[in-house]
Image (cartoon, rainbow, N blue to C red):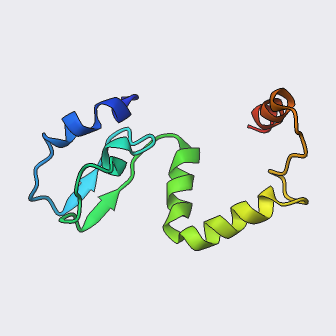
């Protein structure tokens, strides 16, 4: 649980190659699946599993990435709730920290 990004390739060697369904317990950022050095082309269904409702929602929304990208572009625009006019790095980071 946590920090699988550093162990993704090691974990992958233990995943059977003849599976049709793939799921990670404690998916988090889905590091084992997204590791670019591994091949999941043989997998028919991929399941995301995490208790963090925000991460789960992000992955759910990512299924329609064109719509999600449009939302991000709008919200980062001048009238969007993600927009910041801060130019100083400290105040810029503080703005997004407070927003989070």
The x and y percentages for residue 91 are 86, 30
> Going by the image, does 53 lie left or right of 42?
right
- Quadrant position of the N terminus in the picture: top left
- Residue 24: % across, % down: 31, 45
Q: Which residue corresponds to the image point at 81% horizontal and 29% vertical from the top-left? A: 94
| Whether residue 82 is situated above or below residue 5 in the rendered picture | below
Q: Position of residue 69 (x, y in %)?
A: 64, 66
Q: Considering depth in this image, is 8 or 23 the residue closer to the camera? A: 8
Q: Residue at x 39, y 48 (%)?
A: 49
Counting from the top left corner in percent of width and height, residue 10 is at: 20, 34
Residue 62 lies left or right of residue 15; in this view the side is right
Q: Is residue 61 left or right of residue 21?
A: right
Going 37% across and 35% down the picture, which residue do you hit? 5
Instruction: Name the residue: 87% across, 32% down.
Output: 88
The correct choice, above or below, for 92 with respect to 72 in the image is above
Displayed quadrant of residue 64: bottom right
63 or 50: nearer the eye?
63
């Amino acid at each position: 649980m946590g920090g699988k990004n550093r162990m993704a390739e090691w974990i992958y060697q233990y995943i059977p190659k003849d599976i049709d369904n793939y799921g990670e317990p404690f998916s988090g950022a889905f590091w084992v699946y997204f590791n670019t050095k591994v091949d999941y082309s043989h997998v028919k269904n991929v399941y995301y599993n995490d208790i963090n409702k925000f991460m789960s929602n992000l992955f759910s929304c990512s299924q329609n990435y064109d719509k999600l990208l449009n939302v991000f572009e709008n919200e980062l625009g001048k009238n969007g709730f993600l927009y910041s006019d801060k130019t100083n790095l400290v105040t810029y980071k503080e703005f997004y920290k407070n927003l989070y």
